[in-house]
Structure formats: structure tokens, C-alpha cells
Image (cartoon, rainbow, N blue to C red):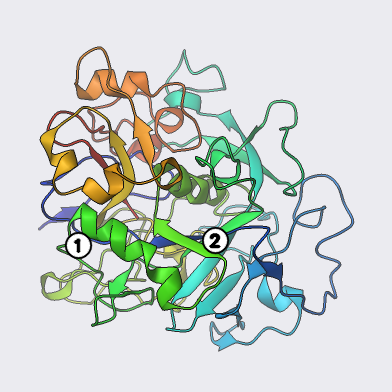
């Protein structure tokens, strides 16, 4: 019986397969520039955007931004889609009261585009890893390893776009800062795909549940296709692109925090009926066998299915664990010939559209990993203790790093 290794939204997963074939199109992440977008105001019965200043969602935090071509999406207690009329219908980024093994209460804002694609808002935040840094107990990054199967803890504080200096002991996540995101500017948040991307049948990205993800596409075409998502959906002021490591990390860290799964591991998407994966499914456990019959995988809107999301309920991001491997817009700049063939659009792209990693003393997995030790927010060095092991990351996940003829990062989304 085949075993599908679990991979949740906090894991270092960077193994690479043959570059000509991509297992799935990485979901297009969509930015909203603060100067080009406007908030859509709903009746705010919970005083959700003003009040406390402790960094919680009810502090001075910018609301999700919608532009023409997007509509707010809410979900009722039966996991049916609704049109929200109050802020609490739409979102409530609240601290989870405990573990989320049986579901979560934090509600992340959702939206839908003109072609029916679903997006999730990741608000600007600062974070600190309070345990498990670099795979070790505590925050020193050395000493005693975390217990087998354990993961570190991440404390998140939501902050307004006007705050550009982190509080003591925290780091503003680089996905939201001009210096960290390569020139997008200071961002109040980012929209990301709710599910792994699929092909709408006409060669365009569509982000919905219960469909086969887009497979067998080159890095070059992934990059170009993601760039057209905002244009195809008439999203003025949006800048869609192939997801970078730091942006994947922004989702992962929020997932692990008190506003996401609060330390509970995301349940794997183990659907593989007839040898075909589908988006938005969950298995029985965080680590689960591949389901080839449909007997133990559950759709996104079921009681078990929501445990595959980053919130433990229907409002989160799905397919962060299991499913299929996905390339991200990040690579080790080692000069391998494949970078100038199957990845040329990515290589020639502006700095803001990619994360570039330097080569180590020699171009090996271990040395390239060590060379990335100063980077943060990308769920790599911070969340693993070694490269080259299948259990070197948090939750005993894979910790592998690109090198040689395999320079592009892939993650399990």
C-alpha cells in the first residue's frame, strides 16, 4: 500500500523533480496595492477594525481590500456560501481558544473573482518563533532537538500598513514589506488562492474545490499563466503572480500561529482515486495513506474535510498538506542550464516576482541550506534543523533543498 507523506503548511519542503514536468501549477497569489485598491466596508457590529492596540485583529489593523471584479464571500454554520452583510459574517481573525483537532473558530476573509475563483486574505503581521527555532527547543537555534513529531510555536501580531518597525522581539513578515517582497511596497495584506489551481479548460487559472489540479506544465508557463490571472478576471489594481517562498511562508506561519491552527497539524489531502488528485479534500488524519477508492477522503465542506484547511474550518486555505508537489517562484542561482530553458520567464522577471537563493561553498544540498540561514519568513531554515532528511523539519517533515541540476524550489501546498 502506498503511503503519502504528510506535509502541512509549516514544513520545509523543497525537493525537486525533473524540471520539464511540473506536478501542479502553484496557486496564483494576488497582491493588492494600498494605493490602487479600496476597502469594501460592511456593517461593523463588532468594532472589528478599531479599539484594542495589542496587535489582535480588533486592534488598528487594515481591513481586507476588494477591487472591482471581486466579491466578499462568507460561510454559514452549515458551510454553505453566503453573501456577508456584517464584518463578522465575512471575517474574524480571532485567537483560537485551544487546539484545533476538531475544528477552529478563527475566520479568514474569503473573496471570489468573476470566473468563480476563491481567494483568502492574509493580513499584514509581525511574528516571533517562541519555541522550535531551527528545530531546537527554545529560541536559540541550538541545544536540544524538538521531540520527535513536534513543531515549534509562532506568535503573530497583526499590524497596520503604517507600522514599518517591528515590536521588540518580533519580525514583520517579509511578504508585507518593501524590502522583503522585492519592491511591491508596504502591503496591508495579500490575497492567496484558497485551493490549488486548476485549468479552466481554456488555459486559464481557476481556483475551486473538487477538481483535478493543473499538472504537466513547465515553470516558464506557470509563471506566465499566473501573471494573467488578474487581467483575465478584470481585477484592476491587482498584481497576480506565481507564489514565492516568502509568500508561501506567510500562509504557513499564520497557519501555525494562534490565529490559524494554533499548533495543530493540518490534515493531509490524500485523495488519489483512479490515480488522480483533487483539490480541497482531507484524509482521516494528519498523516494518512493515499485514498485510491474514495472511502477515506472527505470534501472541503464536510466536518472532516475542513480539517485540511489552515483554520480548521471552511474559511481557511486548503491543499497546504498533501495533494501534489508544486513549484514556487524561488530558486538557487547556481547557473544550471535548466534555469535558462524551462524557467526563463521566472529568471528574467523583476526582483519582486521571485526569491533568489545563493549557492553555498559548494553546490550541495547541505551547503545551499546553510547559505540560507539568514533568510526568514520562508519556512525553511527557521523551521528545520538540517537539510537532506525526510524528517528534518517541524512535525518530522521533509527537509530537502535544491541544488545542482534541480535548482527550483517546490512545496507541498
Residue at x 21% of width, y 35% of height: 407
* Of marks 1 and 2, the one in the foreground: 2
Badge 1 marks a residue whose secondary structure is: loop
Q: Locate residue 241, reporting x and y percent.
A: 40, 58
Q: Locate residue 203, reporting x and y percent.
A: 24, 76
Looking at this view, is 369 or 226 the one in front? Answer: 226
**Mark 2 or mark 1, which is nearer the start of the sequence?**
1
- Residue 53 vs 76, above or below: the answer is above
Q: Is residue 96 left or right of residue 307?
A: right
Q: Is residue 129 left or right of residue 160?
A: left
Looking at this view, is 408 or 171 the one in front? Answer: 408
Task: Judge whether residue 146 can be spotted in this image.
Answer: no
The reply to whether callout 1 and callout 2 are in contact (CB within 8 Å) is: no
Q: Which image quadrant is residue 336 in?
A: top left
Real-space Cα distance between discs 1 and 2?
23 Å
Mark 1 surroundings: few (<14), some (14-19) or many (≥20) residues within 10 A: many
Quarter that holds the C terminus: bottom left
Quarter that holds the N terminus: bottom left
Looking at this view, is 148 or 132 the one in front? Answer: 132
Q: Which image quadrant is residue 28 in?
A: bottom left
Residue at x 30% of width, y 65% of height: 225
Q: Locate residue 176, reporting x and y percent.
A: 59, 45
Q: Which image quadrant is residue 272 in?
A: bottom left
Q: Locate residue 394, reporting x and y percent.
A: 40, 36
Residue at x 67% of width, y 58% of height: 34
Badge 2 marks a residue whose secondary structure is: loop
Task: Judge whether residue 119 can be spotted in this image.
Answer: yes
**Picture disc at residue 311:** 2
Residue at x 30% of width, y 60% of height: 224
Mark 2 surroundings: few (<14), some (14-19) or many (≥20) residues within 10 A: many
**Picture disc at residue 83:** none
Q: Which residue is mark 1?
A: 290
Amino acid at each position: 500500500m502506498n503511503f503519502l507523506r504528510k506535509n502541512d503548511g509549516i514544513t520545509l519542503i523543497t525537493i525537486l523533480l525533473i524540471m520539464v514536468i511540473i506536478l501542479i501549477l502553484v496557486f496564483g497569489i494576488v497582491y493588492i496595492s494600498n494605493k490602487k485598491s479600496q476597502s469594501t466596508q460592511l456593517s461593523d457590529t463588532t468594532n472589528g477594525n478599531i479599539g484594542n492596540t495589542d496587535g489582535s485583529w480588533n486592534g488598528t489593523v487594515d481591513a481586507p481590500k476588494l477591487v472591482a471584479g471581486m466579491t466578499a464571500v462568507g460561510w454559514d454554520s452549515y458551510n454553505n456560501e453566503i453573501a456577508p452583510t456584517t464584518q463578522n459574517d465575512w471575517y474574524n481573525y480571532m485567537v483560537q481558544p485551544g487546539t484545533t483537532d476538531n475544528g477552529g473558530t478563527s475566520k479568514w476573509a474569503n473573496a471570489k473573482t468573476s470566473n468563480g475563483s476563491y481567494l483568502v486574505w492574509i493580513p499584514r503581521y509581525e511574528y516571533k518563533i517562541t519555541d522550535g527555532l531551527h528545530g531546537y527547543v527554545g529560541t536559540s537555534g541550538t541545544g536540544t532537538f524538538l521531540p520527535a513529531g513536534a513543531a515549534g510555536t509562532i506568535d503573530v501580531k497583526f499590524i497596520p500598513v503604517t507600522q514599518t518597525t517591528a515590536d521588540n522581539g518580533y519580525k514583520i513578515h517579509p511578504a508585507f514589506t518593501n524590502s522583503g517582497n522585492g519592491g511591491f511596497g508596504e502591503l496591508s495584506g495579500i490575497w492567496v488562492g484558497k485551493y490549488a489551481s486548476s485549468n479552466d479548460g481554456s488555459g486559464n487559472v481557476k481556483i475551486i474545490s473538487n477538481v483535478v489540479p493543473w499538472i504537466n506544465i513547465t515553470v516558464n508557463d506557470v509563471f506566465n499563466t499566473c501573471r494573467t490571472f488578474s487581467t483575465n478576471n478584470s481585477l484592476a489594481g491587482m498584481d497576480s503572480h506565481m507564489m514565492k517562498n516568502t509568500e508561501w511562508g506567510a500562509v504557513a506561519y499564520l497557519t501555525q500561529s494562534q490565529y490559524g491552527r494554533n499548533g495543530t497539524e493540518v490534515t493531509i489531502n490524500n485523495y488519489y482515486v483512479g490515480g488522480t488528485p483533487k483539490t480541497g479534500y482531507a484524509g482521516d488524519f494528519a498523516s494518512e495513506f493515499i485514498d485510491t477508492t474514495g472511502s477515506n477522503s472527505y470534501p472541503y465542506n464536510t466536518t472532516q474535510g475542513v480539517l485540511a484547511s489552515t483554520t480548521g474550518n471552511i474559511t481557511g486555505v486548503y491543499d497546504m498538506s498533501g495533494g501534489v508537489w508544486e513549484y514556487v517562484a524561488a530558486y538557487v542561482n547556481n547557473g544550471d542550464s535548466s534555469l535558462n530553458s524551462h524557467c526563463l520567464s521566472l529568471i528574467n522577471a523583476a526582483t519582486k516576482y521571485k526569491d533568489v537563493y545563493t549557492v553555498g561553498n559548494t553546490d550541495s544540498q547541505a551547503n545551499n541550506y546553510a547559505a540560507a540561514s539568514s533568510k526568514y519568513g520562508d519556512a525553511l531554515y527557521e523551521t528545520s534543523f538540517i537539510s537532506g532528511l525526510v524528517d528534518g523539519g517541524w512535525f518530522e517533515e521533509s527537509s530537502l533543498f535544491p541544488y545542482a541540476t534541480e535548482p527550483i524550489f517546490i512545496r507541498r501546498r
